Image: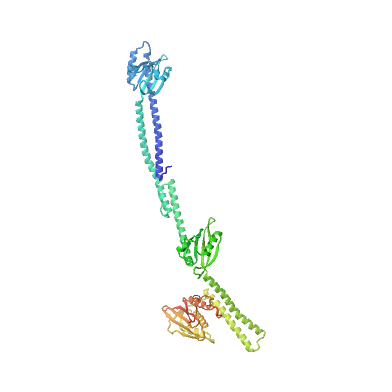
Amino acid sequence: MFRFRSLFGCLMSLYILIVIGTLGMLGLLLSRLLQDYFFAAKQQELVSRGAIIAELARPLFQRGANQREAQQRLEVAGRLLTGGALIIDRQGQMVDSIGRRPAQELRGQVPCPVTQQLPELMEAMDGKIVTRTGYSPIFRESAFFAAVPVTDRGAVVGAVIMHSPVLGMRDTVSHMRLLVFGLALASIAFSAALGYLLARSVADPLNRMSRVAGQMAAGDFESRVPERGSDEVGRLALALNQLSASLQHTVQSLSEEQSKLGHIVTTMGEGVIAVDRGGQVLMANPQALKMLASDQSELVGRPLEDGALAAAFTKAMSDALEQTVEFRSRDGATTLQAHVSPTAVEGSTVGAVGVVQDVTEMQRVERMRRQFVADASHQLRSPLTAMQGYAEALLDEVAPDEETRHRYLATIVRDSKRLNRLIEQLLDLSHIESGRAKIALGPLAVAALLRHAVDSVPPADNQPEIIVDASGDLPLALADEAYTEQALLNLLENAVRHTPPQGQVKVWARAERDRLVVGVTDTGTGIAPEHLPHIWDRFYRADEATKDGTGLGLAIAKSLVERQGGQVSAESRPGAGSTFIFTLPLAER
């Protein structure tokens, strides 16, 4: 089947075919009608003239009539004919002939009666008028014939056979057909012009709509179709423009949402991995690549290599249930946890999304919390047990003498103070980190504060030497005196606790550009490098074998300093001592 490449060509071709077909059928019908009309008119003309000739020929069949005069009248009438006329008697013999061929010429060509060559005309002898069109062997040409009876006193005495050549009439019909054909061609040309305009009026807007639709398919929703008129094409253009505007708004909203989602996924602290139903990785954010120690080319577009993680994705998609799995990183340094959820479209699983978290720190904090609970319970239980035992001994009067009772009471007092100190440290840390503690910043002379803090350290046996290294011309710091002294005391007590009696603890301060640096340096046991990043954490103790302390002193000092806008740091080597430093902003001069 022939297919048009354009709507314009289709409309134009169909329109021209319809016009040509319609005008062709009308032309043929009109030509036929004209031919029939002219032929009928000609035959009617022959019949009318035949009746006149029959009147004029009647004397030829009457005895005693003036036949000479009748022949003269017939001859005059014959000059007016375009064809001719034969006058025959009842036997079919020609009596006379008028018109184009005289009787003398025809008598030599008609060897037999006329009725034998034109038998259908014999009906005229019955008083009927007969017409016929066809070839005449008498006149040797196609002609119109009309047989009109000649009557005399009510009786048919002969007939007049009128004839006229068809050729002339056919020329007239041919000219009429040419005229109809010319008019048809003109009508086709005019109709083609109108069809061109009509097809263009329909095809051009549709072509513009097609281009706009193509641009929409390519993602360009800015183009619009001119809205002309309120007909079907105009309404279609309006609907297309409304669709384009709606799609533009929808795509813009989806793009914004996708951008937001992409930004969220990219900036998430957790790793995000998406796979298709075949297990191929579709997307992995930077955090996931970092956790899995891979890059984009190694991971995206390929199956997961990690056995535990890949098995979790496979099981989540096959069972359509969420899965959680823990596994070690490629270098074994961190513990990762993945939560995998299947993704479904219309009830069919099409992939899965996994969120990967680094739970190493969480597990470490959990271990620290448990250790703290255990340590705090031990620290609380030890003095409480001792206090309970000595109190029961005193109640039971087990002590033999006053000196023993006094020793029991002193132990109860010492352990109660130790218990009270632990509780106060817990409350202080909670108070500071919750932000409920009020801070009063003001100019602070740090050199004097250092000496006062050293003097506040309670003397004890086997205590290392404590010295102060701070000049009196240090600039003033912007700090809270109570908070700063508490932080410094915590650092001092920590240094004294981990320094042998023959060692030394030095408290110093110096100015550096826009800040004041305060430090506590000891010659104690030092701290291993792997512990240094965590010594400021709550409940953390570098030396698990040490039973003194609660692991809260350094955490409290860090919180106090940071609340004042300062920072803390530490330097240490095992066996070479440690230095704990904090900074304070300078007061404006």
Residue found farthest to the top: 64
Above or below, 503 against 367 in this view is: below
Residue 441 on image: x %, y %: 47, 78
Residue drawn 64% across and 82% down?
389
Classify residue 64 as left or right of residue 401.
left
Seen from the viewer's position, the closer of residues 146 and 545 is 545
Displayed quadrant of residue 231: top left
Seen from the viewer's position, the closer of residues 553 and 272 is 272
Seen from the viewer's position, the closer of residues 57 and 493 is 493
Q: Is residue 230 visible?
A: no
Q: Quadrant of the C terminus?
A: bottom left
Classify residue 540 as left or right of residue 241.
right
Residue 370 on image: x %, y %: 57, 74
Displayed quadrant of residue 384: bottom right
Above or below, 433 against 31 in this view is: below
Residue 547 on image: x %, y %: 56, 80
Classify residue 171 as left or right of residue 248.
left
Residue 330 on image: x %, y %: 49, 68
Q: Quadrant of the N terminus?
A: top left
Displayed quadrant of residue 144: top left
Residue found farthest to the right: 396
Residue drawn 39% across and 39% down?
16
Above or below, 72 against 4 in this view is: above
